[in-house]
Image (cartoon, grey):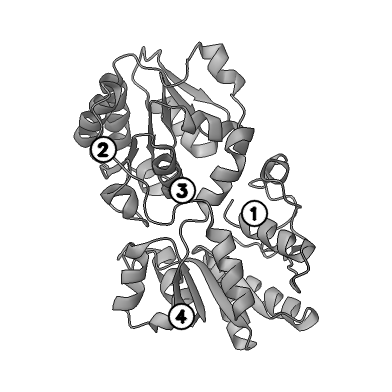
């Protein structure tokens, strides 16, 4: 979702005569279950041209596999710039391989921090930002993080949140999910619940308390929960008896999920991306975490943080369903033009 706008910007520039081309490299395999069949069609881009097939159960083994295979890719494909996205182990590995080859390295969504060094992703972020020649940030908070760590300001560019480019480009293409009709849920009359974070799933007693608090505070408002795998199983097992307004549904394609969240009364999630999209859509959002990678969603946007507190979840859900949410605004440069800025910088370099 964060790569698609840049791919489209490159293709447009090339069609207009600019000397620019790209290759989309995916660290996993072509049959990775997270690559839903509809994803690339929904985003309007081609599937990756290269799959590294670097899979492993251990993060350290995975990192080594990606580094080795991407190093070989760079040997076989002369490259001017490698753009890595976010903070995964594969992202860090590709960054290290590129830097060792002397290739210009750009980090998309740089400067995000949890300030918890025990998190593997936090280590990845520090390594990637430390190596990168070009740091593309989503907002002033990320700029401040990088500057505090001593990065040269000439390497840092606040381009805005590229996730908003995808939302802006596809807003008119969103499709109302059939599940809403099946539930008889009108636009603006339901809550959306998503869950994925391992820490929440592992503390089953607290998760049960949170679900009870949510269902009670929702006061009968339909809760639509697109969940998969362990999250779906855990929530199904822990829901309070007789909870008729909580609906676990199958994960939705991008364009349908986009409609679901854009037209919700409110969203409860542990996903930073979903919280960012909620701010863009001016939809109230509760994040089940103590931090956010983009503090702008809290300081200016519609987001609030409740951590793992059942009482905090109940209090804010009650505000949500009674439509007593805080005023919000769109953070600076969250305007859907981040890819244009990034490509302009790359071509200028």
User: Exactly how many numbered labels are in the figure?
Assistant: 4
Separation of residues labelled 3 and 4 (CA atoms): 25 Å
Separation of residues labelled 3 and 1 (CA atoms): 15 Å
Residue at 30% over, 41% down: 328
Which quadrant: the C terminus?
A: bottom right
Give whichever of 126, 258 is nearer the camera: 258
Q: Residues within 10 Å of mark 3 (few under 14, many from 20)?
A: some
Quick check: 24 left or right of 114? right
To which residue does mark 3 refer?
Answer: 273
| Residue 202: x %, y % from top left | 37, 44
Separation of residues labelled 1 and 2 (CA atoms): 31 Å
Q: Earlier in the sequence, mark 4 or mark 1?
A: 1
Quick check: 239 left or right of 273? left
| Residue 269: x %, y % from top left | 39, 39
To which residue does mark 4 refer?
Answer: 155
To which residue does mark 1 refer?
Answer: 4
Asked if the residue under mark 1 is in contact with the one under mark 3, i.e. CB atoms within 8 Å, the reply is: no
Q: Residues within 10 Å of mark 4 (few under 14, many from 20)?
A: few
Q: Residues within 10 Å of mark 1 (few under 14, many from 20)?
A: many
- The numbered dot on residue 327 is 2
- Look at discs 3 and 1 and give the one toward the viewer: 1
| Residue 234: x %, y % from top left | 43, 33
- Look at discs 3 and 4 and give the one toward the viewer: 4
Separation of residues labelled 4 and 2 (CA atoms): 34 Å
- The numbered dot on residue 277 is none
Q: Establish if 317 lies above or below 156.
A: above
Asked if the residue under mark 2 is in contact with the one under mark 3, i.e. CB atoms within 8 Å, the reply is: no
């Amino acid at each position: 979702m964060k790569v698609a706008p840049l791919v489209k910007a490159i293709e447009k520039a090339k069609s207009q005569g600019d000397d620019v081309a790209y290759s989309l490299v995916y660290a996993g395999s072509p049959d990775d279950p997270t690559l839903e069949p509809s994803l690339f069609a929904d985003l309007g881009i081609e599937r990756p041209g290269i799959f590294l097939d670097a899979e492993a159960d251990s993060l350290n083994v995975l990192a080594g596999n990606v580094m080795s295979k991407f190093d070989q890719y760079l040997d076989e494909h002369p490259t001017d710039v490698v753009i890595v996205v976010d903070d995964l182990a594969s992202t860090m590995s590709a960054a290290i391989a590129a830097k060792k080859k002397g290739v210009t390295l750009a980090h998309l969504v740089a400067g995000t921090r949890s300030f918890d060094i025990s998190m593997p992703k936090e280590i990845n972020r520090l390594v990637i930002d430390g190596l990168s020649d070009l740091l593309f940030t989503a907002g002033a908070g990320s700029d401040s993080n990088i500057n505090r760590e001593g990065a040269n300001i000439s390497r840092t560019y606040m381009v805005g949140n590229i996730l908003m480019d995808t939302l802006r480009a596809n807003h008119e293409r969103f499709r109302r999910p059939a599940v809403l009709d099946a539930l008889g849920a009108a636009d603006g009359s339901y809550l959306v619940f998503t869950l994925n974070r391992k820490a929440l799933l592992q503390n089953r007693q607290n998760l049960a308390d949170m679900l009870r608090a949510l269902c009670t505070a929702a006061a009968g408002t339909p809760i639509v929960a697109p969940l998969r795998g362990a999250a779906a199983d855990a929530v199904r097992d822990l829901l309070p008896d007789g909870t008729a307004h909580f609906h676990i549904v199958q994960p939705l394609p991008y364009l349908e999920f986009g409609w679901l969240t854009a037209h919700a009364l409110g969203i409860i999630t542990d996903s930073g991306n979903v919280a960012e999209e909620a701010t863009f859509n001016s939809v109230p959002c509760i994040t089940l975490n103590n931090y956010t990678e983009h503090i702008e969603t809290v300081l200016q946007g519609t987001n609030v943080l409740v951590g793992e507190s059942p009482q905090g979840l109940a209090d804010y859900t009650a505000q949500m369903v009674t439509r007593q949410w805080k005023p919000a605004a769109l953070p600076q440069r969250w305007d859907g033009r981040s890819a244009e800025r990034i490509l302009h910088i790359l071509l200028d370099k």
